[in-house]
Image: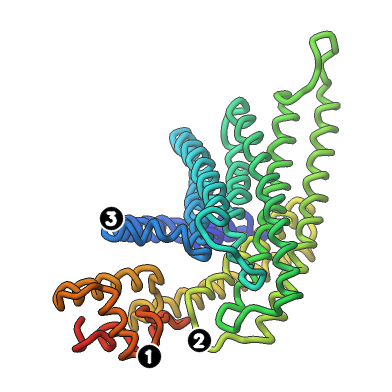
Amino acid sequence: MGTGIIIQLLASNFPYPAQWLRTIGYIFWILDICLFCFFTAMSAARTVMFPKVALAMLDDLQQTCYLGAVPIAWETIGTGLVIFYSSHEPAVYVAQIFFWIAVVMTLLVTCGGVYALYQRQGQHKLDEVNGAWLLLFIPMIVAAAFGSNLANAVSLKNGSAVLVVSYLMLSLGIGCSFLVLGIYLWRLMASRLPPQATIVSTFVPVGPPSMAAYAFVNLSVALARNITLGFFTFNQSWEPAATEATRAAVAEMIMWVGVLGALFLLGFATFFLIEAVAAVATKVPKTFNIGLWSFVFPVGVYANAFCRLSILLRNEGMKGWAATCVMFTVLLWLMCALLTTYKAVLRGKLFFAPGLQGWVEEEELKKVSERKGQPKEDTLDAVQSKSGRGMTRRHPRNDGSYEPGAVNDRLPGGAA
């Protein structure tokens, strides 16, 4: 997600365009594809090797919400295809396939994820509400933004279908996101800020209104284009055809509606951005964890919306602010990328699978029970009696390492 938004910032919407920025954006697009393929392969291997654990993801609130990152990453790849190859007809055809696959993926993740929240999982408490909940609905807004870019590259007939679906996805994404944002704001008032280790999640609410602002103004531009070319008119058979001047006036009005709507949404985004900055300044994270990537995408889509508006309005002040936000986003990406490489590759203490560790330890407990020829419940009682704990799972720290007391330290005889 964070890598994907850099593509648009550098290659498409930067207010001071340059060919070398577009080249860097293309490199980020290739990197985005490689990262998506790598993590997709790893996830597929995990599902094949541990199918029960993969299914158990739907029973965990955080894991369910993070499924929304999959269609978002897919949509950023499709957007890059439009940005770099819109002049090639085969590439545009492939981009259309990407879009419809993205729509299906988004609906499955959003509708299925929400259903899992109240059907498979237990009762949720107010203090459990956090920015990750929005990841179930942000893919719909990103899909609308993808469609807004695609609609300008396809034929008018295909573009009308893309526009209709994109507007539907945008309305659904905005509506659901604002419902969650209201609950989230009340959670902050009632239960205070999130813990220091997850304080960066306060930036996630910046994402939905920012991406919605970009999608809204871009869809307005695409719709205005179709009206100007005479494809979208509401004349009845007995009415005279709309003149070119009428179509131009209507298109201009729709573009201004898009601009004003985008500014309205960016006002909400700015409020949550200020609150997030204040929250992080109050509780500065002491160690790096994978959650710090929550910085990049929300700030990136905020910058992206300002870039698009600054270009349309031709305002130098907005262009300067947009360029500053872009540079800040790139610096955040570089910081997170370097620290991720250091802690994940060099130290191996960043990634962990909460459900997998518990499943592995249950299997180890089963093997010990079979070897001792006693029921698993009796072995579990012995383990709990020896360890003084009421559980056999290790507790992951924020950096991906585990607290002392692994299962092989607590099983009878130190068995692994």
- The residue carrying mark 1 is 388
Within 10 Å of disc 3 (Cα), the crowding (few <14, some 14-19, many 20+) is few
Specify the amino acid type for callout 1.
Gly
Q: CA distance from mark 2 to mark 3?
A: 33 Å
Q: CA distance from mark 1 to mark 2?
A: 30 Å
Locate residue 278: give its quadrant: bottom right
Q: Is residue 203 above or below residue 385?
A: above
Question: Position of 345 compared to 323: left or right?
Answer: left
Q: Earlier in the sequence, mark 2 or mark 3?
A: 3
Q: CA distance from mark 3 to mark 1?
A: 35 Å
Locate residue 326: give its quadrant: bottom right
Q: Is residue 215 above or below residue 266?
A: above
- The residue carrying mark 2 is 287
Q: Check contact, mark 3 vs mark 1: CB within 8 A.
A: no
Q: Earlier in the sequence, mark 3 or mark 1?
A: 3
Which of the pair 358/156 is nearer the observer? 358
Specify the amino acid type for callout 3.
Val
Locate residue 319: give its quadrant: bottom right
